Image (cartoon, rainbow, N blue to C red):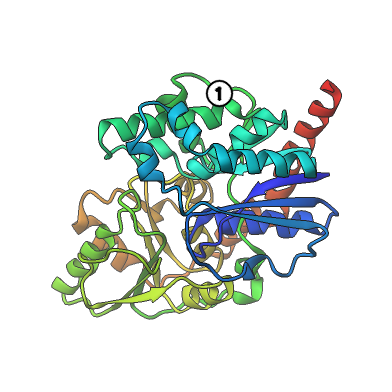
Amino acid sequence: MKIAINLTRDNVGGITSSNLNLVNYLYKLDYEFIGLELTSRIYMKGPALFRHFDPEVFDHHILNIHHLPLMDALKRSRTLRDVENIYKEPIKILRDILNETHPDVVLLSGTYYLPWLISIAAKKENIPMILWYSGVLSKETEHYPDKLRRLFLSMEKSVVKNSSHIIFPSALCKKAVEELVVKGKIKNSYVIPNPVASIFTDPSAVDASIERRIAAAGRYSRIKNFNKFFELHLELQKRKWRHTASFVTNPDANLKTMPKTIELLPSMTAEGLKKFYLSQGLIVCPSTFETFGNVPMEAACLGIPVLVSETMGCAEVLKKVGLANMVISFDDIGKVADRAQELCGQSILPRQLNALKRILDNNFVSEEIRAVLDNTAKKNNFAK
């Protein structure tokens, strides 16, 4: 079976880690892949993240569209069709790739403009698509001006409409899409949590730090709400609670509001993140909305306490395994600081840790996603 998949290479991004976990699993089962990577960068290094895959099995295509900046396209457009016309050249190239490689199914991660372009090409080539939700675009852009917000909503609706099946990483995500995007119930959908790579579930790795070290990691954006992490650090300092604070994020982040007493670290490989998590006493994730939350689940599977917003999909998993005390509203920074002091350096009980690993096991989750892929491809072949 051959799967076309959109690729990213941002080490702090959930799409990158989730895709790599799935591809690493299916790669061993003789699946073939067409990797579709669209980049708006004028320069980038070779794809080290995917170099270990055999090119005969993992066919990687890279389209550079830096000459078509998204915001310029949106400003020049009144409707989504206008935006599509601006990107007709990359859509044509994508159609040619899909026509030549003949994937059985397209697995799209996210609803931003790059997967949207792939969805148009796949629809025109009559290839079934599965949308693997990662971020709700309408939520990510709800603070944008009216015109941009309307265009992004249309873009997200288009990807959803073009997909024959949808995988949601949480019930929270599904509910948000039904309420904000499609305004109704979604059929042919599944709720499957994002998998955690085996490097974070190795039983010999559980050795939590007892140091007063708090940290956050992820893409710096409004919806990730990392300014609350900065506020927490300052509140703990005000209480004279001695600790260190670190932030792992993308190198181009605009961090004018970050206190100078927080250590800034660049994005890391999975091995680097593992060492980083194990050196911390608490990982903090204050997102105003997140479909899942890979970072806190990776840390928790290593036995490191986490403190996540109640508006994150992974909160459902934490509550299910008896770790509801690691879920909180970030509206009251005083209460957040109380909980952070309580949790920092604690151990996660073995029964809770084992339950967490069972739910997020990469093999188990990947098998569930594999079943959706196989079922979609079989239905399409039968229809032909």
**82 and 115: which one is in front?**
82
**Residue 191, located in which quarter of the rendered image?**
top right
Identify the residue at the far top of this view. 184
Q: Residue at x 80, y 45 (%)?
A: 2
**Vertical placement of 239 versus 92: above or below?**
below
Q: Is residue 226 left or right of residue 21?
A: left
Q: Is residue 138 left or right of residue 338?
A: right
**Quadrant, the N terminus:** top right
**Residue 16, located in which quarter of the rendered image?**
bottom right
Which type of secondary structure does the marked residue at label 1 adopt? Answer: loop
**Quadrant, the C terminus:** top right
Q: Work out whether residue 311 can be spotted.
A: no
Q: Amino acid at mark 1?
A: Ile
On the image, the x and y values in percent for residue 270 come to 57, 70
**Vertical placement of 297 versus 376: above or below?**
below
Q: Residue at x 72, y 60 (%)?
A: 24
